Image (cartoon, helix red, strand yellow):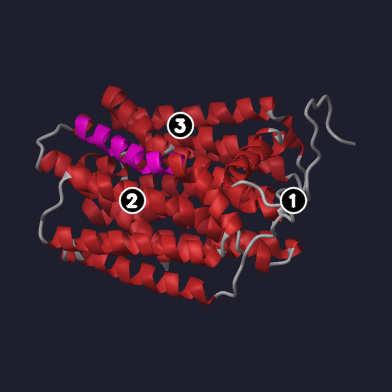
Amino acid sequence: MAIAATVSMVVLIGYQTYDIARADYGMGRRDAAFILGLLGVAQFIPLMLLTPVAGWAADKFDRRRVAATANGVDCCIAVLLAIMTWQDALDLPIIFCFAAAHGAARIFLGPAQSSIAPNIVPPALLPKAIALGSIAFTIGTVAGPAAGGFLFDVEPALPHALSAVMIATSAILISIIRPIRAKQSDEPVHPVRQMVDGAKFVWFDRFLLGCVSLDLFAVLLGGATAMLPVFARDILQVGTEGLGLMRGAPALGAGVVALIFSFRPLERNVGTKMLWGVAIFGAATIGFGLSRNFGLSLLFLAILGAGDMISVFIRNSLVQLNTPDEMRGRVSSISGLAISASNELGEMQSGLAAALLGATGAVVFGGAGAIFVTALWAWVFPELRWAKTFAPQYRKQEVKEPPS
């Protein structure tokens, strides 16, 4: 429920930003696309600054309360967006402030919420639980932007108002879960030391570092979603309704993959399949950038989402199952920072590339970059290729050959 609401809110913020830049500020297509990139930076800055605190909070306090509080902040943002959209009072500085506040809320929500599942689901069932969670995520990601786009055409303030109600409901539901707190050390440790320990744990574990950084750099280059408002408004000319369908198409492809994994979870050669998932993501990104047919563009976006889901599902399972419970909040926050950096800084990269190459050139360049990163990571981090199952992986600082 909260996913549908927040994704709808974020997608419409992007469209409103691009539309305001074009209509109210008189910017050209490339300059307005660059503003979309800056919107990603506005979301990323609080993520970067607050990641250590968010991970520590998820490991120190009741995780459901942390998640519910973050949802409360997003609810307030949605209410303000509805009011200011209704009054036609939005401008770029206000939108950027809302984007930064949403980034701050999201970095606290992610580690707390993702760390709840391992506490209530047996390890053997965790991959299936992640797959089922991905299905729920996909339904929200498909339904949210699609419904938001249609409602926006009826009354621009309406989807934001509905998002506020849905996020508030989600916060209440999270609060109903039994209290969950990570295992605590017998000896008190200073919060700053705990934050540093989380970063060191990931940095010195080559397997976790490879998993986290693969997503960071591949999606950083291959993110096409930042340019969707440009394609919807000026290239494919399908408006907000088409934007909602385009934003939901990757989630639809991801949902099909998640549904398959919930019934037939992956068991063998998971590392290699994770790498192939990123490569498919990059190839489909190139196809989308070159397409000028709306139906074909939706198909490429669905394939893009399917490839991304293969990678994300495997990576999330490996990270959760290879991390001690007392470290999960901090490791999840670092993983969340990598995901957010890839998304938000990816928007900045796409905006800058669009200013130089145009929207099509930016998307095609990004897809090619994602394929290059996949090949490079397969060579630099051979541990990823050697991961055969979701069981805790073999680790060694200097790896000369795969484990027997």
Location of mark 3 (residue): 221
Front-most of 231 and 154? 154
Categorize mark 2 by other alpha carbons within 10 Å: few (<14), some (14-19), many (20+): some
Categorize mark 1 by other alpha carbons within 10 Å: few (<14), some (14-19), many (20+): many
Q: Is residue 114 above or below residue 199?
A: below
* Label of residue 390 in the image: 1
Q: Distance between the Cα atoms at labels 1 and 2?
A: 36 Å
Per the rendered image, the range of residues in magenta is 31-48
Location of mark 2 (residue): 101
* Label of residue 8 in the image: none
Among the two numbered marks 2 and 3 on one chain, the one whose residue lies closer to the N terminus: 2
Q: Position of residue 404 (x, y in %)?
A: 90, 36
Residue at image coords 53%, 44%: 52
Is 399 on the left-hand or right-hand side of 143? right
Q: Secondary structure at mark 2?
A: helix
Q: Could you tell me the amino acid type at mark 2?
A: Ala
Q: Position of residue 219 (x, y in %)?
A: 48, 37
Q: Distance between the Cα atoms at labels 2 and 3?
A: 25 Å
Q: Could you tell me the amino acid type at mark 3?
A: Leu
Q: Position of residue 39 (x, y in %)?
A: 30, 40
Residue at image coords 33%, 64%: 75
Is 181 on the left-hand or right-hand side of 9? right
